[in-house]
Amino acid sequence: MTLTAEARATRTPASPSPMRRRRKAAETRAGYAFLAPWLLGFVLLTAGPMIASLYLAFTNYNLFTSPEWVGIENFQRLFQDPNYIQAWKVTALYALIGTPLKLVSALAVAMLLNNSHRGQGFYRSAFYAPSLIGASVSIAIVWKAMFIDNGIVDRAGQTLGLPAGGWVGDPGRTLPMLILLTIWQFGAPMVIFLAGLKQIPTELYEAASVDGAGPVRKFLKITLPMLSPVLFFNLLLETIHAFQIFASAFIISSGTGGPARSTLFYTLYLYFRGFRDFQMGYASAMAWVLVLVVGAISFVMFRTQNRWVHYSGESK
Amino acid sequence: MKRSVLTATGMAVVAALGLAACSGSGNGGDAAPSAGGTADTTPVTLNFTWWGNDDRAARYNEALELFNEEYPHITVNGTFAAFPDYWTQRSTEAAGRNLPDVMQFDLSYLREFNQSGQLLDLQEHIDSGAIDLSGFDETLVESGVLDGKTIGIPTSTNTLGMFVNPNLLEQTGVEFPDAETYTYDEYNEFIASVAAAGQSTAEGYQIYGAGDYTATFWFFVQYLLQKGITPFEEDGTLGFDEDDVVEYLEMTADLRANKAVYPVERGVALKPLGGFTVNESASEISWDNFLAGYVADSGTENIEITQIPSVEPGEKALFFKPSMLYSIGANTEHPEAAATLVNFLLTDPEVGRIFGTSKGVPADEEQRAAVETEEGSVDAKVIAYEEAVAEEVTETTPIPVKGFGTIEAKWLELGENLNYGTITPEQFASEWFAEAEMATM
């Protein structure tokens, strides 16, 4: 849309008539008018509060009395706080293990659905459904009920010889439980993978078949390279997403980050600090460290992408 | 939708005008408001919020209906939440100077909210008679006074008690120690023998004597009082040190090591219920007003309440904790109507009957008298208990330090970790004090 508009604009003659200029100005005004709701929301609800929190990060603020400037004290405290270190450990583990597994399962399902079969539309919707409802509170509650002792997963596990007792109360099994939940919500990246797979020219596969390449070789030499831009996009998005986990962990741990701090995710701990302990300055400092770290991770990903991401058509 | 917004705005404007007129006439000299409120009947809408479960909500709705019959011009919007969420909501509102007109309040958060004058000084309305405290014990009213301002009035009192499930005792064949004289050691022996009995419930879960009681901060406060230590000093500092904490936590170290206390894994999974409420744990220390909730959750009427153990035999050093205060947001536009509601909830005998002892034993004399004490009922048991231990109540209420809510939550969290074996009592103490130092400053 915008691209064609720009293209048309560049084609206009170099000496615009006053009439045209007026129309252009009107168009600009209309453009801003349409943009206004979003812009207002952005300034008032996102940018403004972010700047405020940057200031608060350097203060001692308990919501009741005015903020009091303390310099970098909040940031110094972060690294002496055992719970803060624990929050990073839990979150990093979740992102490092959960994200790749989620992408692998999304790609696998996308490849299965890429073949033409009868009722394929139904399967696509069916596999996408968990992602639509996955972030909701109700699914977290259902998940908890499934993994609780004597719940369905616990009973199934017992017949397979796993120790009884449920996952919810076992600090060693709560993180795997949440990782399973995120893997199950592979729908969004799957749809993007599926679109990417459709873009790969079939001639490439046909040519490879003629040359005698097997399915594994085709996957490694054609599918993966051709899909790498989509893979990069999904990896970036899902990594950022992983750092934002909150609702499911909050509900499954009954709002405690337990048992034994095993689900004390970064955002959860931030919330506790801000709203349970009334330490808004400390919570703001935490938020800004998270922004910086996620920003740094994204930066590194972008910088390394030309080593493995292949954009067809731009090379040569 | 639109119309209701308009009506509400209109009503608010009218109400504001009405109040202005009212205060004008008050200055005129004929200020004779009865306990029933002023004669002003301009429609007013109040926001009222409390924490609690469905059971409490049903009781509040009943009480508010009564209120509406008597004061048809005052509409009350009642909302409620669970205790932890309740405070995140209130603190956010406080930051925006947007607190509800009337709130149920807890002693442990009074100091925080008082810091910037968020709560209305009720003294004016007590003096005018709008809030009638003639049926209240004076020391109890004082517990809601901070820096010379009455910012909360307790509805009732609680004291700690020991809840026992006789069905489980019978099944395991273990006898409960002599409630008048037993010490923590004897209580620990009892817990160990219930676990050793090796009995299970119908669903196949093992029966235990109790959970690890050291994981609750208020019980530690009670223990300190029994040892003669003042938990909170006048100047807002703590009256105990890390050694006291470690010594307390070590009391149940053997029980934890031998897995004789209720398993924390199952306790965590059961939240918000617990071992006692699912009839798998034979005893539990708690506030005496919990009996109504315990009976409702566990599905058995057969729960007894008796005395807690002590450090020295018979020296219980109990205290009455003022519970469920009512406060009015300083930002309210209808202080008179809010005071009328507070007065109604605090003193109306019918409200006393509706709530029984579910908020604690009512502070108001008439409400206390209105509680139905049918033989064997929950309310009768709680009132009988408070009467029985009245002589043991020798301590004044320890007024919580600032940041109490935080350090209480921290204690619970560390107690859980202690039971999972991820920290030692020494680590517990040092981590807790690090947190307390930040929270109370």
Image (tube, coloured by chain):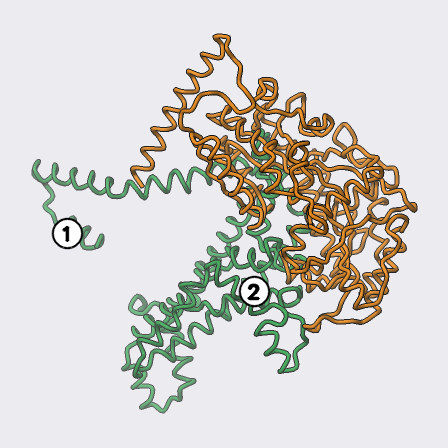
Q: Residue A144 — which label?
A: 2
Residue B157 x/y as whole percent: 70, 37
Residue at image point 62% right, 82% down? A160
Q: Is residue A135 above or below residue A12?
A: below
Chain letter for the residue marked with disc 1 in the picture: A
Element type where label 2 sits in the image: helix
Chain letter for the residue marked with disc 2 in the picture: A
Q: Is residue B277 above or below residue B325?
A: below
In the visual, does B417 lie left or right of A97? right
Earlier-in-chain disc, 2 versus 1: 1
Amino acid, disc 1: Arg
| Whether residue A291 is visible | yes
Rendering colour (chain A): green
Q: Badge 1 is on which residue?
A: A8
Amino acid, disc 2: Lys
Residue A271 x/y as whole percent: 56, 47
The C terminus of chain A lies in which quarter of the figure? Answer: bottom left
Of B315 and B37, nearer the camera is B37
Q: Residue B78 — which label?
A: none
Q: Residue furthest top?
A: B28
